Image: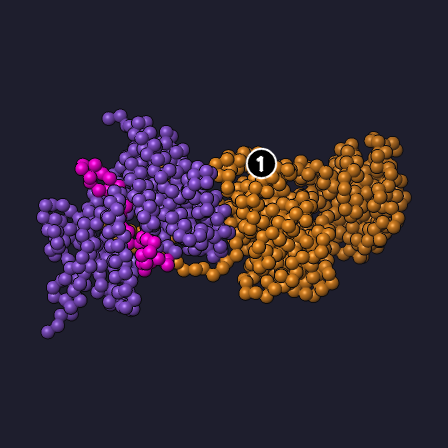
Amino acid sequence: MSSSTPIEPPAYRLEGERLKDGWTVSSRLDWANDHSGGSFSVGYLAIRDDGTQGFLKAFDYTTALESEDPATELRRLTDAFLAERTVLEHCGERRFSQIVRILDAGTIRVDGVVTNAVSYLLFEWAVLDGRTAVTQADPADHAPMLTYAHNAAVGLSQLHSAQINHQDLKPSNLVLVDELGALSGKLSDLGRAFMLGRPAPHDDLVVAGAAAYAAPEQLYNCPSRLRDEGWRTAADLYMFGNLVSFLLTGVPFSGITLGDLHPTLRWKEWNGTFDDVLPALVDAHGRSISKLKGALHKAVSDAIAGIIDDLCYPDPRHRGDHVARGRGQNPYDLSRFITRLDLIAHRAAIHLKRPK
Amino acid sequence: MTAIGENRRRQVVPRWRPWLDTVKLGQVAMPGKRLTIHREPVIERLLLEYKTTGHIGLASEIVSAALVDSVDSSEVESIARELASTASYPLMRQMAELLLDVDFGGLADPAHYDGRIRISKLKGILADEPRNSVRWVDLAREYLIMAQYQQSQSAMRIALALAPHNRFVVRSASAMYAQLQEFDLAIDVIRSSPSYRHDPWLLAALVAISDLSDSRQLGMREARRTMEADISQAQLSELRAAVGTVEFRSGSSRKGRQLLRRSTKDGSENSLAQVEWIAHDSREVLLDHLPTGVPRAYEALARRASSSANWERAIQHAMDWTWDQQFATEPRSFSSSCACAWENWSLAVELAEGGLVLHPDQPVLLNNRAFALIQLGDLRGALIDLVRARSVDAHSRSKIVLAATEACLFYRAGMPATGRRRYQQVIAVLNRRQERILAAKAALMLSREEYFAGSYGFQAAWHRAEELMKYADVPEIRDLYNRIEESIGSRSPSPHGSHSVVDLAPLVPEPEALAPGIGR
């Protein structure tokens, strides 16, 4: 007698599974599931015997096999898994301090089903992410947020030094990890990353990550404004500026800039060229920078607005550190932003200390 | 005397409006084929997560994603409402309000307009955003409105350096140079944009401006090719109007009429105004009714109202037109001419003065104010305007109209013989030029002055005017005839003094425009 109840794919049935090194898969985190762009992944909390927590990302081959084009989807999924693992291992080898650490990667065989293989990646557990940090923060106290922004800048700079572009920087992908009692911001989810010499299924996409955080030249489909792979770095800078804005004002910069455009100019409505819409974007950008300044503490508002102005400038040819550009240096090099954020973080810690 | 539609040549020179107004009219770029890009279903995932966690960081992310992705959802709206009322981050509240209340406003209120404040604000913006090309264009427009021509051109040059190929910038620059009568510069700006050969809005500007200039006609071949392309009616409207005008004037009137009529289908107000102007100029009906719902069709409505001698309505629309194109002289001269035709002399003075503040040497405005001042009894003021008008460069038609106003002043100043001779010369020149309507108008003006001067020549002048009216059977002339007939019936002749209260010596020499042989 056969049962009419559909059987859950094995990637959804990992609770209680034992892994290497004393890890056990604990509860499923439905909000962490990803069914976009051929990802088909499921999130879990994993716990080691000593009580250490981890985040497990399981790749769901069954759903890929049940798709309309299983061969393509399966290839895309395995490619995505291998690509992300390669990037993470590369980062691990180079001991990148501000990239979330991969603790394990492998395959689980689930009993009772024919297609029982589930590949997984196990990461260090994050206490918070950028969104929960903003929720819990005091909006007037910029100091801790500036520290996280600084951490993120270091993380992105580390990736860029290895010729890796994150391509999906957003508040949920900045995680705060407990390191010896202090929270440290790290970049996570490299599933959309681009790495030179390592092909990935999403390499040909103009917007590899979430459109809501993408740079305008990506949304308006004009990445070719910059030669070679420079546009990926420029887009990373834009997304990083979005993230800094979110940490300090609670709002991604795209929301106030692109949301301020007349509806006919928004990327989903716009049919013209990027060149034609660019003056409108520059105009909206200027208005948004003014709004942003007004929302920050005066002691740091100009400096922070200056950073976001540089990072989120709509024309990628003029994006990046303006001083570096003026000196003929690489404006996309994040080292100057790291210094700038460090300085502001210190200034904020001194000037914005709230009375106890 | 005044003349409605003093402008003897009109073309669809680009309208120049502030950036945001142009955006609202959908004229900043060509629609093309939208390319599909990969897109993650961010909102759905975030909403799912929000149901389990419900914190404001996530709410902010949802509202931001909805704004960027133009998502219209009641679920997102309710999150935005909550955020707007409870968020402790000021920018979060502002962003939520942006989603809840997308009000992009209408026209600014003319009553609260202050050009100096606008300039100051724009300069403030540009100090922070020096690469903001559209605001440089807006600044150039404000300077032009304030008649600060050098500053206007400097600001426009910066805009052009920043965005030399952007349609809005190029069209605005061409409108500015056309307004300044720098047609060659206007043409150069358009031709330096690589897209002018296929962008109908740029081609329309090129055809129109080269038609107005004395240079050879440009852009017609590309225009014909573009009009054959698969482009929507709305995008081709001004191009059809520009080409139609050229065809109409160059003898292909059937083809021209066809194009002009087609230009009004789903067309811009500029095309509609062009059709109305040609209809008025050629005294033929091109459109039975004006299409409704065309945004800012002020000029077309004003011209249509003036064609039926509905002066009050024509002035109302002309005032909106003035506000829409504040830097232009044509709407101001048009509205003051209508006020004179309506015999609302104070309003005519006020409207002309509004234009003279910005264009102190504009002959039509000087003439209109002088004519209205004569009717109000301010002969000295009228004399000053007419002397000044003589010293400025004007089209021959304007000079003839000015001579008629001088004739009127001679009558009122007690020099009927000089006034009579000047009127008669004006009528003769206008007849030679086949300007039937103006000739009839001048003849009616002469007979009115003859009547009030108690002259024996009144009957002859009146008969002459009635004769000329047979060739000028239009509402404007019939309205003037009725007004004069009424005033003659209600007032007795009241000859003006035998000696002049003002010294009209500067106006005694005959204007060149009236010399025999001129105007043939």
Q: How many callouts does the rendering have? A: 1
Decide which of A298, B157 is in the foreground and name it.
Answer: B157
Residue B162 placement, left or right of B315:
left
Pick the quarter of the image with the N terminus of chain B.
Answer: top right
What's the magenta bit mostly, secondary-structure-wise? loop
Would residue A162 be seen by someone viewing this image from the given angle? Answer: yes
Q: Could you say which chain is coloured purple in the image?
A: A
The chain carrying label 1 is B
Q: Amino acid at mark 1?
A: Gly
Is B97 drawn above or below residue A32 in the view shown? above
Q: Residues within 10 Å of mark 1 (few under 14, many from 20)?
A: some
Q: Residue at x 40, y 52 (%)?
A: A229
Q: Is residue B274 magenta?
A: no
Residue lying at the far top of the rendered structure: A355
**Quadrant of residue A341 within the rendered picture:** top left
Image spot of residue B474 (x, y percent): 74, 55
Element under label 1? helix
Q: How is the image coloured?
A: by chain
Would residue B321 be seen by someone viewing this image from the given angle? Answer: no
**Quadrant of residue B276 within the rendered picture:** bottom right
Is B305 drawn above or below residue B455 in the view shown? below
Q: Residue at x 75, y 45 (%)?
A: B2
Q: Residue at x 87, y 46 (%)?
A: B515
Q: Which residue is mark 1?
A: B115
Residue B406 placement, left or right of A92:
right
Boundaries of the magenta span:
A176-205
Residue lying at the far bottom of the rendered structure: A1
Image spot of residue A132 (x, y percent): 25, 43
Image spot of residue B111 (x, y percent): 56, 37
Q: Is residue A178 magenta?
A: yes
Q: Residue at x 84, y 37 (%)?
A: B507
The colour chain B appears in is orange
